């Protein structure tokens, strides 16, 4: 993947969590999980704090009731490492 393409995908990953709340509320969780899975493949082993935080928040937002609290806790731990 070229630099510009990677930058675009990282930017998309950073903003994905903003779309997950409305998506979950609209009943399209399965489709959102598919998008999230494809983004996880694209970003691979990134260490970009903003991307890691956004993906963790997206996973937490889409989590079922049994896993949501644990995933929000994991996302909260990433906040100090990421810029606003």
Image (cartoon, grey):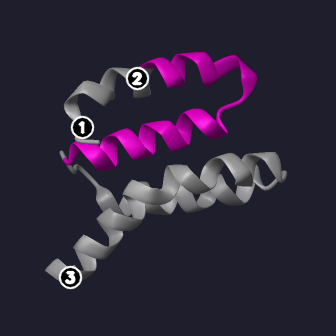
User: Where residue 76 is drawn, which disc sits there?
Assistant: 2
* Region in magenta: 48-73
Please identify, in this view, whether the residue under mark 2 or under mark 3 is nearer the observer. 2
Q: Quadrant of the N terminus?
A: bottom left
Task: State which tag comes first along the sequence, 3 or 1.
Answer: 3
Please name the residue shown 50% across and 57% down the image: 16
Callout 1–callout 2 Cβ contact below 8 Å: no
Compute the Cα span from label 3 to label 1: 22 Å
User: Where residue 4 is drawn, which disc sits there?
Assistant: 3
Q: Quadrant of the C terminus?
A: top left
Left/right of residue 30 with respect to residue 36 in the rendered view: right
Corner quadrant of residue 4: bottom left
Please name the residue shown 56% across and 33% down the image: 60
Task: State which tag comes first along the sequence, 2 or 3.
Answer: 3
Compute the Cα span from label 2 to label 3: 30 Å
Q: Is residue 68 magenta?
A: yes
SS assignment at label 3 = helix
SS assignment at label 2 = helix
Characterize the magenta stretch by its predominant secondary structure.
helix
Left/right of residue 34 with respect to residue 74 in the rendered view: right
């Amino acid at each position: 993947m070229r630099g510009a393409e990677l930058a675009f995908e990282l930017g998309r990953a950073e903003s994905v969590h903003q779309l997950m709340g409305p998506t979950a509320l609209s009943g399209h969780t399965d489709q959102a999980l598919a998008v999230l899975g494809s983004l996880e493949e694209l970003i691979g082993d990134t260490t970009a704090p903003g991307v890691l935080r956004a993906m963790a928040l997206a996973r937490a937002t889409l989590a079922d009731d049994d896993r949501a609290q644990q995933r929000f806790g994991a996302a909260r731990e990433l906040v100090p490492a990421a810029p606003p």
